[in-house]
Image (tube, helix red, strand yellow):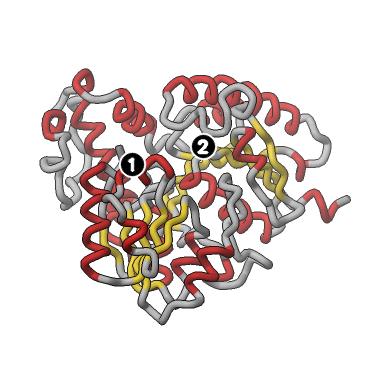
């Protein structure tokens, strides 16, 4: 019994998107390999798609988005945010309170590690009397930029010297840079910025980056939040240090597709000969961008693996798939960590999601950057 309990108990909450569950689940696996018991909480569809890889990790669904919303019904919908928050708040609070009644100290939740993109779990930790740890799923650079923008739209000033970095003048946000201007921005951006209202109030802050990558930003952020720490890339251990046994993939996949097809295809290609194109699970490529990428690939005459959503397929130029049949492969999903680590992949065209950037850096794959989120 003692071996299965673990030497401490940590509750981890993730927002149910690929780019959030993957790094938090890897963090949970790192904790578990140190003998710490972890309860990993997220939506029902997310927990159903997780393979924990460790007996010390248990799953806790906090909102039924399968029967109430459908597997993809929550995507991009503010209504989901409210439902997820209400249901999760009650379930997590009850779970923590029940654990604190355990006679075995090792079973009591000591800390709530929560996805920083949802700020309200901080209240759950404070009301429950457990430690709070926010996990930053974005790069520190973007975190710093949003932090400063949040101050500007509220008409507040920095209490420390500003970080020397580009402003938002070319991003379409120029009308709110000089603030206050909260009434003129989208509900999504308001939600994005709102989490910074309580920045620095959690006990700990973790970011899946490393010092040499974002040293200047990390040191600057410590002036605002002294307890922030870089914990290194949160990609499967097999590609880093092999400290986590049998950790060869993220252990999370909501796309039930055969991954062997694209890997078998890559096995037939020469080293560094394939261009990998992907825009993540949430970002959407515009019609003109799809056509520009397609024509660039065609003109280059190179082999390419294009991860494309089904809804984007009709945006391809007429007969493009037929004309590039011998060179290109189209899939709606791929095991990206295995693809980017494949010797045949020479370049990646990326939407610059934090996980994709980290993977490309770890594997040394040159990037063509197309930052997007719309």
Q: Helix, strand, or loop for circle 2?
A: loop
Query: What residue is shown at x 59% (from left), y 26% (from top)?
Result: 88
Dot in front, 2 or 1: 1
Please state which of residues 216 and 38 is positioned toward the viewer in this rendering: 38
> Could you classify mark 2 by the number of other residues whose Cα lies within 10 Å: few (under 14), some (14-19), or many (20 or more)?
many
Marks 2 and 1, the one that precedes in the sequence:
2
Query: What residue is shown at x 43% (from left), y 52% (from top)?
Result: 207
* Label 2–label 1 contact, CB within 8 A: no
Query: What residue is shown at x 42% (from left), y 35% (from top)?
Result: 201
- Which quadrant holds residue 296? bottom left
> Could you classify mark 1 by the number of other residues whose Cα lies within 10 Å: few (under 14), some (14-19), or many (20 or more)?
some
Instruction: Establish if 294 lies above or below 343.
Output: above
Residue 101 appears in the rendering: yes
Image x and y of residue 345, in percent: 40, 72
- Which quadrant holds residue 374? top left
Image x and y of residue 5, in percent: 80, 49
Image x and y of residue 49, in percent: 64, 44
Q: Helix, strand, or loop for circle 1?
A: loop
Please state which of residues 211 and 159 is positioned toward the viewer in this rendering: 211
Instruction: Establish if 147 lies above or below 175.
Output: below
Whether residue 148 sits left or right of residue 328 in the image: it is: left
Q: Which residue is mark 1?
A: 284
Q: CA distance from mark 2 to mark 1?
A: 20 Å
Using the image, tell me which numbered label, if any, was put on residue 15. Answer: 2
Using the image, tell me which numbered label, if any, was put on residue 304. Answer: none
């Amino acid at each position: 019994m003692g071996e299965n309990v673990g030497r401490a108990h940590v509750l981890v909450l993730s927002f149910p998107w690929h780019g959030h569950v993957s790094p938090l689940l890897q963090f949970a696996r790192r904790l578990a390999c140190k003998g710490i018991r972890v309860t990993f909480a997220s939506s029902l569809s997310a927990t159903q798609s997780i393979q924990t890889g460790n007996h010390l990790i248990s799953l806790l669904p906090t909102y039924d988005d399968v029967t109430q919303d459908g597997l993809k019904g929550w995507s991009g919908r503010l209504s989901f945010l409210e439902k997820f928050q209400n249901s999760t708040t009650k379930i997590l609070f009850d779970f923590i309170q029940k654990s604190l009644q355990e006679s075995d100290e090792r079973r009591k939740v000591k800390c709530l590690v929560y996805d920083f993109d949802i700020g309200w779990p901080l209240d759950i930790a404070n009301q429950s009397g457990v430690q709070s740890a926010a996990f930053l799923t974005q790069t520190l650079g973007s975190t710093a930029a949003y932090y400063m923008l949040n101050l500007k739209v509220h008409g507040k000033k920095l209490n420390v010297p500003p970080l020397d970095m580009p402003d938002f003048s070319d991003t379409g946000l120029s009308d709110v840079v000089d603030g206050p201007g909260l009434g003129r921005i989208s509900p999504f951006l308001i939600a994005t910025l709102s989490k910074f209202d309580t920045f620095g109030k959690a006990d700990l802050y973790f970011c899946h980056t490393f010092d040499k990558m974002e040293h200047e930003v990390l040191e600057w952020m410590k002036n605002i939040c002294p307890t922030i720490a870089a914990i290194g890339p949160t990609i499967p251990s097999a590609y880093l240090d092999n400290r986590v046994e049998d950790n060869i993939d993220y252990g999370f996949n909501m796309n039930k597709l055969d991954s062997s097809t694209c890997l078998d295809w890559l096995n037939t290609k020469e080293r560094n000969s394939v261009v990998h194109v992907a825009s993540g699970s949430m970002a959407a490529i515009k019609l003109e961008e799809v056509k520009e990428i397609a024509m660039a690939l065609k003109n280059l005459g190179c082999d390419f693996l294009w991860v494309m959503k089904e809804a984007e397929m009709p945006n391809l130029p007429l007969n493009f798939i037929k004309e590039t049949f011998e060179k290109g492969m189209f899939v709606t999903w791929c095991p990206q960590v295995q693809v980017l680590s494949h010797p045949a992949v020479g370049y990646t065209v990326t939407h610059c999601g934090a996980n994709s950037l980290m993977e490309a850096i770890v594997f040394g794959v040159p990037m063509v950057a197309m930052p997007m989120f719309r």
